[in-house]
Amino acid sequence: MRWILPEFQRGNYSICEARSTKPRLVFFDRQHDAESNQTRKDIRSLRIDAEDSAMISKPSEPELLLPDILRKDLDVVFCGINPALSAARAGHHFSSGSNRFWRVLHLAGFTPNQILPADDRTILQYGCGLTAAVERPTVGANELTRREFRASADGLERKLRRYRPRFLAFLGKPAFAAIFQQRTVEWGPQSMRFGGAEVWVLPNPSGLNRAFSLEALVSSYRELRTALQRQSQ
């Protein structure tokens, strides 16, 4: 039951509520109540704006990138397909114990000893560098798209022109095939240059590549080593 009292209707105060036969007046200030409502709206708006801003400025998870290991005038830059997620988290190239890269590199004659992943930057001492066709780390290379490979081509070429290695060795066929739009790819030396470097395609040393034994990998990498030595004479 509601009571409207004439003497209060024209002022800032208006009251009227009764739950029994005796009216109980509850006074409130219309102006103060309106200001309070607006304040609550402003606070709510600020809270929403702050939350939206935080969502925009804060990524869902930190972006992981594995830095290249490069310097100018190297003999060869080995170009992986893309970093493994585990390698990006570790901060070192070919950090998985199942990857045969460091062992093959040593057995093929590129390094006098087998480099540990934690010491990956020492590869520069032997005229070798490391990069990847696509920067984005993934659990498996099959998560990448051909569009990502093609989009990375210009950046890779600029990198090569800046650092001027003699050879670029793709580790595996997928990146080379996508970048150069080749349906069939042969192992070993290729007919074109890329960013001024001679191009080779070597088998991927990943432990998942069961098509190549350790001996077959070493033989393929040794061919590149021999070509480097022959060119240096």
Image: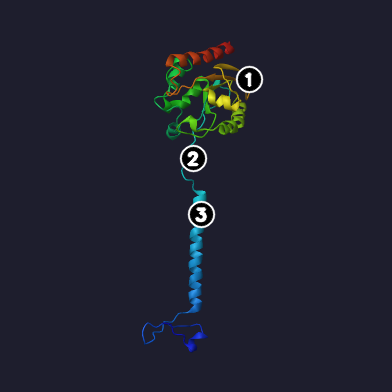
Residue type at numbered disc 3: Asp
170 vs 16, nearest the viewer: 16
Outermost residue, bottom direction?
7
Image quadrant in which you'd find residue 187: top right
Give coordinates of residue 91: x percent, y percent.
45, 33
Residue type at numbered disc 1: Met
C-beta proximity under 8 Å, tags 2 and 3:
no
- Say which label, 1 or 3, has the lower sequence index: 3
Residue 52: mark: 3
Residue on which disc 1 sits: 192
Residue 63: mark: 2
Of labels 2 and 3, the one closer to you: 3
Quadrant showing the N terminus? bottom left
Q: CA distance from mark 1 to mark 3?
A: 50 Å
Q: Secondary structure at mark 1?
A: strand
Please tell me which residue is depicted at 54% across the width and 25% down the height of the picture: 174
Question: Visible in this render: residue 102?
Answer: yes
